[in-house]
Image: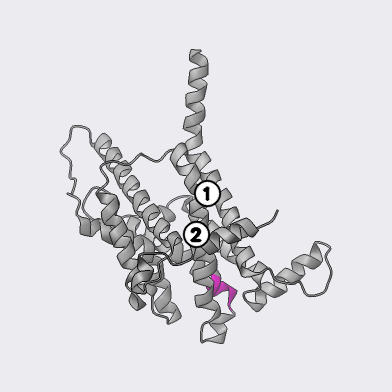
Amino acid sequence: MSLQPFVSIFRYALEPIAPFTWFGIKVCSLELVAAFRLCIAVRQIKETLRAKYEARAGGDKLAVEERSFLRDACTALTVKFGGEAIICPLLGVPPSFMVSGVSPCVFIAAQAIVEYIPALPSMSLNTELPLSFVDGLTRAMLLCSLIPPVVVTHSSPAIASSPWTLLLSSLVIPNGGFFITNMFSFLEPTPLTLTTPFHLKAYGWTTTDVWSAPMIAGLYALLTHAQPFWAELHSVIGTVLGGVSDKVEPLDPESARALCALILAGIFSTRTVKNFGLGWKKSVTEKIKVQ
C-alpha cells in the first residue's frame, strides 16, 4: 500500500494557515483541529461525569461546584502541557509554552468557543469512530514530529542516544496531563480533591493511550533509525526475518509518520468499537427480537 496520499495529507495539514500568517504566526490546521478536539472531548467527559454524579447522589444535596472558565481553561492547558511540564525540566530544555504563547492562546480560545456551544452530542460510536482517524493524525504528529527531535538533538550525547529517554518521554508527555487532571479531580463536578488517577488503578496500564504512545514512538524510531540503538535493532530484526545481513536502509520520516498515523487510527478505532460497539450490538439485537 502506498503511503503517499497520507504523506500529502500531513503536508497539507501542517502548512501555516490564514489569518495567523497575516501576523507572522505559524499555526497549522492540524493544531487547530487538535485544540478543538481536545476541548470538546474534555467538555464531553465533564458532562458525563456530572450526569453520573447526579444519578449516584439521587435526591441528596449535591456538593457540585459552579464551573468557571478559568478552571475549564486550566484543565485543557494541563491536559495539553502537563506531561511536557514534567519531562522538559528533567531534560534541561524549556517547555514549548515558555518559549511561545501561541499554542496556549490557541487552546484557551478553543476552550472559550467550545464552552459557548449550547449543547454537544455525547460520546458514541457514530461520533467517535470517524474521529479516530483525526486522533491518529494528531497523536502521530506529537509522537513522531515533536517528541523525538527534543531527545535526539539534545546537547548531551548520553541523552540524545538513549532509547530509554525517548520511550519515557513519549510515555509521559502525552499522558502526564491527564494523570494530573485526574489526580486533582479537575474533570469532576465537585471541588478539587486529591484522588487516585485511573492510570494507577487496577489494570490502568492497559489504557490504550498509555501503552500505544511509547510503542508508536519506538516504531517510528525503529523505521527512521532515530538513534543508533534502533538502527542496530532494525538490522537484527531484518536478519532474523530472513533478510540480507547488510545494513537496513531507514524509511524516510514522512512515510514513517504516515504509517504510524494509520496504525494509531486503527488502534483508536478498535478502542472506540470496544467502548461503544457493545451497546450498538445490544440495540440491534433488541430490534431483531422485537421484529
Q: Measuring from the top left, give residue 109's x and y in whole percent.
A: 29, 60
Q: Are marks 1 and 2 in contact (CB under 8 Å)?
A: yes
**How far across and how far down the image is residue 266, in percent?**
58, 49
Q: Read off the magenta span.
A: 162-166
What whole-number distance in Å separates the C-alpha atoms at marks 1 and 2?
10 Å
User: Mark 2: which secondary structure?
Assistant: helix
Q: Amino acid at mark 1?
A: Phe
Magenta-span inclusion, residue 163 = yes
Above or below for 164 versus 76: below
- Going from the N terminus, do you reach mark 1 or mark 2 first? 2
The x, y position of residue 166, in whole percent, is 54, 72
Along the viewing direction, whichever of 139 and 234 lies nearer the viewer:
139
Which secondary structure type mostly characterizes the magenta part of the structure? helix
Q: Position of residue 135 (x, y in %)?
A: 48, 53
Q: Residue lying farthest top?
A: 291
Q: Is residue 91 left or right of residue 224?
A: left
Residue at point 38%, 62% (across, down): 80
Is residue 23 something that shows in the picture?
yes
Sort mark 2 into few (<14), some (14-19) or many (20+) by Cα contacts within 10 Å.
Answer: many
Disc 1 secondary structure class = helix
Residue sitting at x 44%, y 41%: 127
Q: Which mark is residue 139?
A: 2
Q: Is residue 3 above or below residue 281?
A: below
Identify the residue under disc 1: 268
Residue at the far front in the pictured view: 22
Residue at the farthest left position = 61
